[in-house]
Amino acid sequence: MPAALLSREDAIARIAEVFREYGFAGTSLSAITEATGLGKGSLYNHFPGGKDQMGDEVLAHIDAWFEARIYAPLRQAGNPRSAIAAMFDAVEDYFRSGRRICLVGAFALDATRDRFAAKVQGYFTAWIEALAAALARGGAHDAHALAEEVVAGIQGALVLSRALSDPGLFKRQLAQWRQRLNTALA
Amino acid sequence: MPAALLSREDAIARIAEVFREYGFAGTSLSAITEATGLGKGSLYNHFPGGKDQMGDEVLAHIDAWFEARIYAPLRQAGNPRSAIAAMFDAVEDYFRSGRRICLVGAFALDATRDRFAAKVQGYFTAWIEALAAALARGGAHDAHALAEEVVAGIQGALVLSRALSDPGLFKRQLAQWRQRLNTALA
DNA sequence: GTCTATAGAGTGATAGAC
DNA sequence: GTCTATCACTCTATAGAC
């Protein structure tokens, strides 16, 4: 067989960026072809379920990243303060200081949500619960409510940062949340 | 001429709900036809610029609502505490306790943003500045940063509330922000 | 020879424009 | 309603690794 032009991993990562740019409904297969260099034949060979399957696999890919880099460290026994600091570092890195949006959040806002409801809900539930666990270990009051506030704050900061074309806003808000959680753990 | 089936105002309101449901890219003219009862001919009669113009007018409609009901009261001289309380009431009402998303926020997240960038930016800038003015009048420290936090918090709460199908989350977070602003003004 | 990844013309349906 | 462009998707075919 001919050599693969792209690993599956790379293809999914590139497709994710197209979804991020145009949204799920706004993404056409030709945009995906352009971004990946793969023709329709190749795309349907890898993803027989078409765009829906691509959406599923992109969400699974994102979830795996967050599970490994954010949720698991938060859940581990260990210093909650440093686990939370590592979460903020990873978040700032992942979202490119606010220049990159949260695809799961974007999927949550339109009719795409119905198609991927379970994955979207799972992503946020896992994040909130992992963060709440770390906060509770650190002795914070109302750990679950606080975790919801933080995750919502991050999502909102991404929306605003993007709307105002101001990555600085995202960084400032993350800094504020870092500080609030630090005092909550004190 | 035949009687109009729908006032322009009503048509725009219905189109807005379709955009809210499917996103801008995901909305087809036939969905708009179905929601308004207006054929393609009528739609192009009212909106010669097509979907783009509908998007513009929907955003202008939303902006006018927020200007009248939220920004102007916040900017007026008067008790900032009650102006801010009125803002939260209006927000909770407008977003149907979290069951309705923020269309401007949704537009900000995908490529739709480029088309409507100015209006999207104007909406959030006006909100943040009006709220910051009220907070500053009330003697809050870092009024602008706090206003950014609140507006981001509302956007994030809408995302989460929708993602988790949990309107309660939106209401709870609004309550927390009410309280935080109250102490910031004390 | 078999299997897999590639390419891309061609399908019907539907989009938005008028 | 009519138009053309484009949509998601199918199908046939080839190239090349084993």
Image (cartoon, coloured by chain):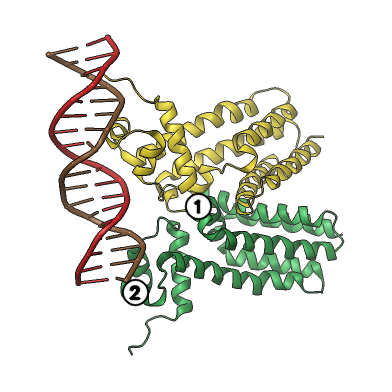
Chain colours: A yellow, B green, C brown, D red
Residue at the (57%, 56%) spot, across then down? B105
Work out whether residue B65 can be spotted.
yes
Give the structural element (helix, strand or loop) at label 1.
helix
Parent chain of label 1: A
Can you tell which mark lies on residue A38?
none
Can you tell which mark lies on residue B37?
2
Image coords of residue A185 (percent x, y): 78, 35
Binning the other alpha carbons within 10 Å of mark 2 as few (below 14), some (14 to 19) or many (20 upward) gives some
Q: Is residue A26 left or right of residue A148?
A: left
Cα distance between the residues tagged 1 and 2 = 25 Å
| Amino acid type shown at disc 2 | Gly
Quadrant in the picture for the N terminus of chain A: top left
Q: Is residue A20 left or right of residue A144?
A: left
Residue closer to the observer: B138 or D6: D6
Residue at the (82%, 54%) spot, across then down? B142
Binning the other alpha carbons within 10 Å of mark 1 as few (below 14), some (14 to 19) or many (20 upward) gives many
Residue identified by numbered label 1? A109
Residue at the (61%, 50%) spot, across then down? B156
Task: Report which quarter residue A56 is drawn in.
Answer: top left
The relative height of residue B20 versus residue A84 in the rendered view (above or below) is: below
Q: Is residue B8 left or right of residue A83?
A: left
Q: Is circle 1 on the same chain as circle 2?
A: no
Residue closer to the observer: A28 or B146: A28
| Amino acid type shown at disc 1 | Leu
Image coords of residue B35 (percent x, y): 37, 69
Question: Among all residues in the image, which is located at the extreme bottom?
Answer: B1
Quadrant in the picture for the C terminus of chain A: top right
The relative height of residue B3 versus residue B124 in the rendered view (above or below) is: below
